[in-house]
Image (cartoon, rainbow, N blue to C red):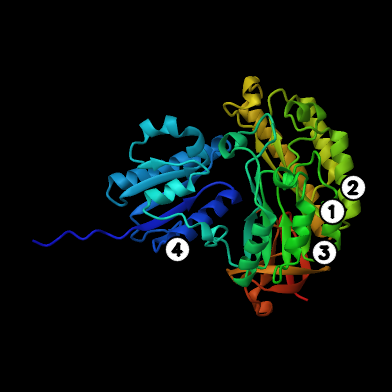
Amino acid sequence: MKAKTLRPTKVNVVTLGCSKNVVDSEVLMAQLRANHIAVDHEAQGGDHNVVVINTCGFIENAKQESIDTILAYADAKDKGLVEKVYVTGCLSQRYAPELKDGIPQVDAWFGTRDLPKLLKTLNADYKHELVGERLLTTPGHFAYFKVSEGCDRKCSFCAIPLMRGGHISVPMEDLVKQAGKLAANGTKELILIAQDLTYYGLDIYGKRNLAELLARLSDVEGIDWIRLHYAFPSGFPMEVLDVMRERPNICKYLDMPLQHGSTNMLKRMRRGITQEKTEALVAAVREKVPGIAIRTTLIAGFPGETQADHEDSLRWIERMRFDRLGCFTYSHEEDTHAFTMEDDVPAEVKQQRASEVMELQGGISFELNQAKVGKVFKVLVDKAEGGRYYARTEHDSPEVDNDVLIPTAAGHLRIGDFAEVRITAAREHELDAVPA
């Protein structure tokens, strides 16, 4: 009688949510590959018999997207298209007990710090010598670079500490080693990420040590751009700006989520800062690093937000003239301090206020971009598509900021290389350019 042959494990990793999840998926994939297990990222079709879904649980829309994705793969399992479905990440960390009964097709649920358990379930060994190794899912010339995990902040709206735990910094030596490996493999841009970048080092060095980390990463040969994401404004370590100003390979770019312009709302959000202190901080940043681009994120419709608070925030945005700004509507999250407040701003009002914020910022972004026409910028070429190269200046992060569009007919450029270009036209979120 012919023996039944077992199908070899082939894993498809599906990533939802933020860039921190992207890094977690890349680490998982490197571990699987080192265990000689075939793995792909978000493969369409193919013969994958195992799916690992790395979920997001940040706000309602993200949670729904994660649940919809799990249900889609549960259905695929029912149809015999996959054999095993595993769920990890933030949604799983927070809601697995409630979701287990409703989605029995999921074979196992894992939290945000359960990588060794997940690997064991996949018959793989957790290889400690691979710490920091990743299979990049981004284009090879840039990589998200996670310097810490978790958060100790007590912002009233945020559930991240519930899902990611307290702040844990990665030792500096490990990060420098990781950066060296990435550079050796062709990575030119490191996008530093954390729940709170400016808290880096406080837990292991007894002080905020982001400035020293930046200096050491700046010394890594082959790293041409270092970009800072998710800096908390309260207690911002100003020495970081000195390093940024002095080191040419640290981008003049700062992503600092400020959440609101009204002091009343900032107090209710437990942000530890006021409108006046925020304005003073932004002014100091711009003074210390001339030409810096500041990106921020705001929340519309937080509990108790009045029309006066909203209008105060709009006036503040006009004064601040941020280079980049995103706005999302408030999501009422269980077990946060804000959940004890009444979610009293109607959904349609939240959306209207968010739209007004983005309309105002659209005009500011258009004016700032118009001022770039005729000027020459160094850009990093990300891809070629539809007869155009898509590139970015040091003031632009992937996916969320401006694209610089260069006709492929204007001259040959290599993906992942730097080029000098002259801006010929500008819109709200795009710049046209030709090689300089």
* Relative depth, front residue between 27 and 225: 27
Is the residue marked by circle 3 packed among few (<14), some (14-19), or many (20+) residues within 10 Å?
A: some
Tell me where residue 180 sits by quadrant.
bottom right
Q: What element carries label 4?
A: helix
x, y (%) of residue 58? 58, 38
The numbered mark, 2 or 3, whose residue comes first in the sequence reads 3
Residue depicted at x 71% and y 51%: 229
Q: Which mark is residue 34?
A: 4
Q: Is mark 1 on a helix, strand or loop?
A: helix
Q: Which mark is residue 9?
A: none
Amino acid type, residue under disc 4 in the picture: Ala
Q: Which mark is residue 241?
A: 1
Q: Decide: is 43 above or below 260.
A: below
* Relative depth, front residue between 385 and 17: 17
Residue at mark 2 to residue at mark 4: CA–CA distance: 47 Å
Q: What element carries label 2?
A: helix
Q: Residue 247 carries which label?
A: 3
Residue at mark 2 to residue at mark 1: CA–CA distance: 9 Å
